[in-house]
Image (spheres, helix red, strand yellow):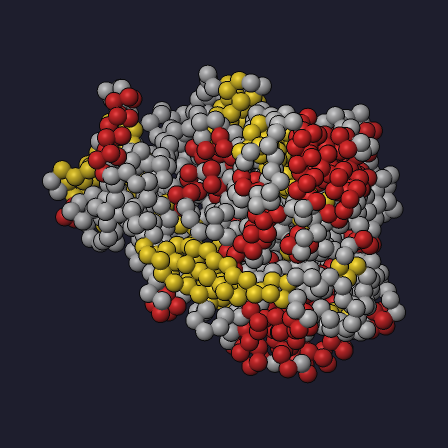
């Protein structure tokens, strides 16, 4: 494998300009949470515009100015079909944007959107074009009608004989309201299954329970707030690497460009290096220990009396307000199912007393556990909370992401919420507590998850949502429908999961041998009855292995640009994502496929004619919620318009949900819990939930929650590296999106990241003889996996220690390989790989033992032994993969 | 991926013959340990040839600015002797390269941002894109949707000539087109 590798990436030195009569559509980026506004130009291939403003649709003279937002890079151009005829396509950030990506800023991911559009002479030709069935081992085209007949036939059998929770769905949670509404209406409404999980976790439910229980909505902030902040604490997130424009437009700039940035991460990323170079801090935290870091910072703040006393007095619940049941916190969570006997929620005075006496909050102990020098912890507390000589406080904001909530889900998020609250953040301009976000917000539930039927329960509480992977591995699923996710690579201990799928699908003796749907159904019934599983994979590309190897049926989906869709970004900004070119082959949007199946099953209410009808129907299900767009739909009806068309009039600016009516006009909501927002009486269909102007608790006051290292310590000790092992943590990197499904089809991106990589500290590299460019094996022979343990009755029954005693924890193995990047950006003892690189995901060496309270995996706590395999072909290549540091400032 | 040098050149020549036009030449920009196929072959229609410097005047890691292909603001480039072999590098050590100094993200000025220790240009002061000058201007980290345009160089004795551009220069819609 040591020959130099060259991707045939040939940069273009010209791009056709859209002529003045080119068709213009508005949309937003398909990828990260920021959702930058884009304009799309299409025109027939036989003509081109000219460089004078009068000669092109952008109405600008070429060459265009620096930072003009009007430059068309060659990767922003493609050729597609529109109404059956070849057309030029230009997808370019909206240079006139006044919100989000102001002035046409964009990321590398959004900047290459045009290359995802189906072009039979480019790598995007790999799109799925026909419904297919695996007949005698080979996927072959069939009709939609036949596909639905087979799916309905086997589904009826599974539902009748094994019940709804043997019928599983694993889908994205974000790919547009129209689709998720149809998915949830089917799964939870028509079928009533509990065996459902979103793409990135083992089951439904909150990702950041600490915020929820404190009364803080995870997406309460507005991008202006990040711009206005004077100091920002980033926990397990670098916005530059993962939500580029939020960083480059709002954090590097915004109302206050001189803000101080504090990043707590196990590796120094580009954004962290930028922050450090401008008076901020980089806290190199050992994976999984953030709760201790948060508590130590909190303790320094409280010891010095730097907390925001005025804010706490007004906005933080006292003991009586919690104990009397008015809080929505750990005593009274979203459905008041969570009994904790005073263990978590506590008034400020008691919290202070507790943290000052808590040994793991003590500075030297914290330094030892977290690896962050005590001086840095103290400095962080100072930057966040120390009042200035005139008594004023820095406007502090707090951003968190998966780096902390996929380690110690409960403890990290509760302590993070407290840190923000005592600094006076959460409900006012420039002072916010929010997630940065990963994907956009595109979930609209057409029915609720039937939690009461879930097989899982924590001691002393009502049911909790399922861990679908464990449910499958334990043999409870007979039919699984996967939509728009890799499932296996994206989940923990991914290789063990793959083995189970393989056993239950293609290793099962009952394989389809006939194109006749009736015969196929009979075969699949025998599969189910023999303990096997039938898998349907619905996606835009062939997905390995779930689609290419395991699925019995593969269904082609239409996606971004191929249907009118809607979705919100990380500041709840709703936009229309326009259809602008032909759907490839026989692909159909997911909502339509769901509807086709549902009608075959005889379910009512799946008769939509177009995506606008789905959108309009879905609106009333979001009325009381954060993503409420019901007033827009009502207003459209009043004006005799389709709701999609009214939203289209709002272009790339869209409107921030929850949408309200004021004086007959549609008004957006900048931030939630906004103590500066003044509301009159609600108008027409407008809803005014309490959390618009106060925290999301019964009293409107936030709740402080105690966080215990001991709750997590037993698990952390069990998975931490031993001997010559390293932590193998994982995450994203700026240039790639998700599992690289589109990136794999973009030569420009593939020349940069042709293969999985692993960052390793120079000392760790030297000890193992590993240099940058070497191919490295990463092996973990202690990948812990939970089986069983669904019902907890006694107090501590589901703690890691007790689960292990009861035989519910098993040891499995996992391995991947990767190209080494030796860099001091990553801390000694820690290696970092891309979480979901398709062929060799870092999730292979990650334990599959969820947080017992919240059922969230500890994805970031992988480990492994690193050994050199040899030199990779990239080591001496001039055309593929760069080994230069990402942290040069 | 595993083709030998001979096969690769052969392919390029066939591609050249198929393309037909007499004004079209194909330049192979091979480094010492690297063989290029279509990926680095460049179709040059009619870029001007311009003498931009002398090999003997270059000192390692000390960039020299020059204008190419035109004399306007956008045609600002940097010539540098990296001191290590590079993709498209010329000279005895294959280490002399030249690149546009306008960031291919939004045109930010990269002049003055050369970091000799790492052989990168950047980060761009606007949005922090950084480019690897050993690897044909590939983005190291950043938001640029194109590699940094590399100026095709040739030597004639001690003279360095610019003869083409790989990639679209920021601001232009076509490097060789007339301006508005």
Q: Is residue A343 left or right of residue A45?
A: right
- Please, is residue A397 above or below residue A170 in the view? below
Residue furthest top in the image: A46
Instruction: Point out residue A789 in the picture as x, y percentages from the top left corner.
Output: 71, 64
The quadrant of the image that shows the C terminus of chain A is: bottom left
The quarter of the displayed image where residue A350 is located: bottom right
Q: Nearer the viewer, residue A17 or A498?
A: A498
Q: Is residue A249 visible?
A: no
Q: Is residue A810 left or right of residue A610?
A: left
User: Residue sitting at 78 percent across and 72 percent down?
Assistant: A794
Instruction: Point out residue A322 in the picture as x, y percentages from the top left corner.
Output: 83, 69
- Please, is residue A779 above or below residue A116 in the view? below
User: Residue sitting at 57 percent across and 77 percent down?
Assistant: A366
- Please, is residue A18 above or below residue A150 in the view? above
Q: Nearer the viewer, residue B6 or A339?
A: B6
Instruction: Point out residue A85 in the picture as x, y percentages from the top left corner.
Output: 53, 17
Q: Is residue A475 visible?
A: yes
User: How many marks are shown on the rendered structure?
Assistant: 0
User: Residue sitting at 74 percent across and 25 percent down?
Assistant: A609
Q: Is residue A844 left or right of residue A595?
A: left
Residue furthest left in the image: B157
User: Residue sitting at 66 percent across and 36 percent down?
Assistant: A523
Q: Nearer the viewer, residue A486 or A18?
A: A486
Instruction: Point out residue A508 in the picture as x, y percentages from the top left corner.
Output: 60, 44
């Amino acid at each position: 494998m040591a020959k130099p590798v060259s991707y045939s990436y040939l940069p273009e030195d010209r791009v056709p300009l859209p002529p003045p009569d080119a068709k213009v559509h508005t949309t937003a980026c398909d990828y990260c949470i920021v959702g930058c506004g884009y304009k799309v130009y299409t025109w027939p291939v036989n003509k081109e515009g000219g460089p004078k403003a009068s000669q092109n649709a952008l109405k600008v003279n070429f060459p265009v100015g620096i930072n003009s937002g009007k430059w068309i890079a060659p990767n922003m151009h493609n050729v597609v079909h529109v109404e059956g005829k070849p057309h030029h396509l230009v997808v370019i950030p909206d240079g006139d944007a006044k919100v989000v990506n102001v002035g046409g800023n964009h990321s590398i991911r959004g900047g290459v959107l045009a290359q995802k559009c189906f072009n039979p002479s480019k790598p995007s030709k790999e799109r799925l074009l026909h419904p297919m069935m695996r007949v005698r081992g080979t996927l072959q085209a069939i009709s939609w009608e036949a596909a639905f007949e087979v799916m309905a036939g086997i589904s009826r059998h599974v539902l009748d004989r094994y019940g709804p929770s043997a019928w599983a769905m694993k889908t994205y949670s974000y790919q547009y309201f129209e689709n998720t509404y149809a998915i949830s209406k089917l799964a939870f409404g028509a079928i009533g299954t509990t065996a459902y999980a979103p793409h990135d976790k083992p089951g439904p439910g909150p990702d950041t329970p600490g915020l929820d229980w404190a009364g803080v909505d995870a997406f309460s902030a507005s991008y202006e707030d990040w711009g206005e902040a004077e100091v920002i604490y980033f926990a397990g997130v670098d916005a530059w690497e993962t939500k580029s424009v939020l960083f480059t437009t709002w954090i590097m700039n915004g109302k206050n460009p001189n803000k101080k940035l504090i990043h707590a991460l196990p590796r120094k990323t580009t954004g962290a290096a930028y922050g450090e170079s401008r008076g901020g801090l980089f806290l190199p935290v050992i994976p999984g220990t953030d709760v201790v870091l948060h508590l130590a910072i909190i303790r320094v703040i409280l010891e010095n009396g730097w907390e925001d006393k005025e804010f706490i007095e007004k906005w933080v619940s006292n003991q009586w307000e919690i104990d009397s049941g008015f809080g929505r916190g750990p005593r009274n969570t979203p459905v008041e199912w969570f009994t904790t006997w005073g263990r978590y929620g506590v008034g400020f005075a008691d919290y202070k007393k507790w943290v000052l006496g808590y040994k793991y909050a003590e500075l030297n102990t914290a330094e030892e556990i977290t690896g962050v020098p005590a001086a840095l912890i103290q400095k962080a507390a100072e930057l966040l909370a120390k009042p200035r000589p005139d008594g004023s406080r820095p406007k502090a904001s707090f951003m968190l992401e998966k780096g902390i909530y996929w380690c110690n889900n409960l403890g990290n998020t509760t302590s993070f919420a407290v840190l923000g609250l005592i600094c006076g953040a959460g409900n006012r301009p420039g002072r916010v507590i929010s997630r940065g976000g990963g994907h956009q917000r595109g979930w609209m539930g057409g029915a609720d998850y039937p939690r009461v039927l879930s097989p899982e329960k924590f001691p002393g509480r009502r049911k909790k949502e399922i861990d679908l992977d464990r449910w499958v591995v334990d043999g409870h699923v007979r039919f699984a429908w996967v939509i728009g996710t890799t499932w296996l690579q994206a989940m923990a201990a991914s290789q063990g999961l793959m083995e189970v799928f393989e056993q239950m699908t293609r290793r099962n003796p009952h394989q389809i041998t006939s194109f006749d749907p009736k015969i196929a159904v009979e075969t699949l019934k025998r599969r189910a009855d023999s303990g096997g599983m039938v898998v349907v994979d619905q996606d835009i590309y062939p997905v390995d292995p779930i689609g290419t190897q395991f699925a019995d049926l593969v269904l082609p989906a239409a996606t971004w640009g191929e249907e009118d869709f809607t979705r919100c970004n990380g500041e709840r900004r709703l936009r229309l994502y326009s259809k602008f070119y032909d759907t490839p082959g026989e692909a159909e949007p997911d909502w339509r496929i769901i509807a086709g199946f549902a009608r075959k099953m005889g379910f009512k209410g799946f008769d939509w004619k177009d995506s606008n009808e789905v959108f309009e129907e879905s609106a009333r299900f979001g009325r009381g919620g954060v993503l409420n767009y019901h007033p827009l739909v009502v207003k459209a009806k009043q004006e005799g318009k389709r709701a999609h068309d009214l939203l289209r009039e709002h272009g790339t600016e869209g409107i921030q949900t929850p949408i309200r009516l004021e004086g007959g006009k549609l008004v957006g909501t900048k931030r939630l819990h906004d103590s500066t927002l003044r509301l009159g009486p609600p108008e027409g269909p407008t809803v005014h939930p309490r959390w618009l102007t106060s925290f999301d608790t019964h009293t409107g006051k936030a709740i402080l929650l105690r966080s215990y290292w001991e709750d997590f310590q037993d698990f952390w000790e069990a998975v931490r590296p031993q001997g010559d092992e390293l932590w193998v943590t994982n995450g994203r990197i700026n240039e790639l999106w998700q599992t690289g499904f589109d990136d794999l089809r973009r030569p420009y991106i593939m020349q940069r990241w042709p293969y999985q990589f692993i960052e390793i500290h120079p000392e760790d590299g030297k000890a193992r003889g590993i240099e940058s460019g070497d191919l490295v094996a990463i092996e973990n022979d202690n990948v812990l996996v939970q089986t069983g343990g669904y019902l907890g009755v006694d107090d501590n029954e589901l703690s890691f220690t007790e689960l292990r005693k009861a035989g519910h924890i098993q040891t499995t193995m996992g391995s991947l390989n990767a190209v080494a990047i030796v860099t001091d950006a990553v801390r000694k003892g820690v290696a970092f790989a891309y979480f979901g690189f398709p062929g060799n995901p870092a999730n292979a060496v990650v334990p599959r033992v969820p947080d017992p309270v919240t059922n969230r995996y500890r994805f970031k706590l992988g480990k492994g032994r690193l050994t050199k395999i040899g030199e990779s072909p990239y080591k001496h290549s001039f055309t593929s993969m760069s080994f230069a540091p990402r942290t040069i400032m | 991926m595993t083709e030998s040098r001979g096969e690769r050149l052969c392919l390029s020549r066939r591609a050249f013959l198929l393309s037909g036009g007499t004004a079209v030449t194909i330049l192979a920009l091979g480094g010492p340990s690297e063989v290029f196929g279509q990926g680095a072959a460049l179709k040059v229609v009619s870029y001007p040839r311009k003498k931009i410097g002398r090999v003997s005047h270059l000192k390692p890691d000390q960039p020299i600015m020059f204008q190419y292909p035109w004399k306007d603001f956008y045609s600002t480039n940097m010539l540098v002797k990296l001191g290590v072999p590079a993709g498209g590098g010329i000279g005895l050590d294959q280490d002399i390269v030249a690149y546009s100094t306008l960031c291919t993200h939004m045109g930010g000025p990269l002049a003055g941002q050369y970091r000799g220790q790492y052989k990168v240009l950047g980060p761009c002061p606007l949005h922090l894109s950084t480019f690897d000058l050993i690897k044909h201007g590939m983005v190291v980290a950043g938001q640029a949707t194109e590699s940094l345009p590399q100026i095709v160089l040739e030597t004639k004795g001690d003279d360095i000539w610019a003869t083409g551009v790989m990639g679209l220069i920021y601001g232009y819609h076509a490097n060789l087109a007339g301006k508005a």
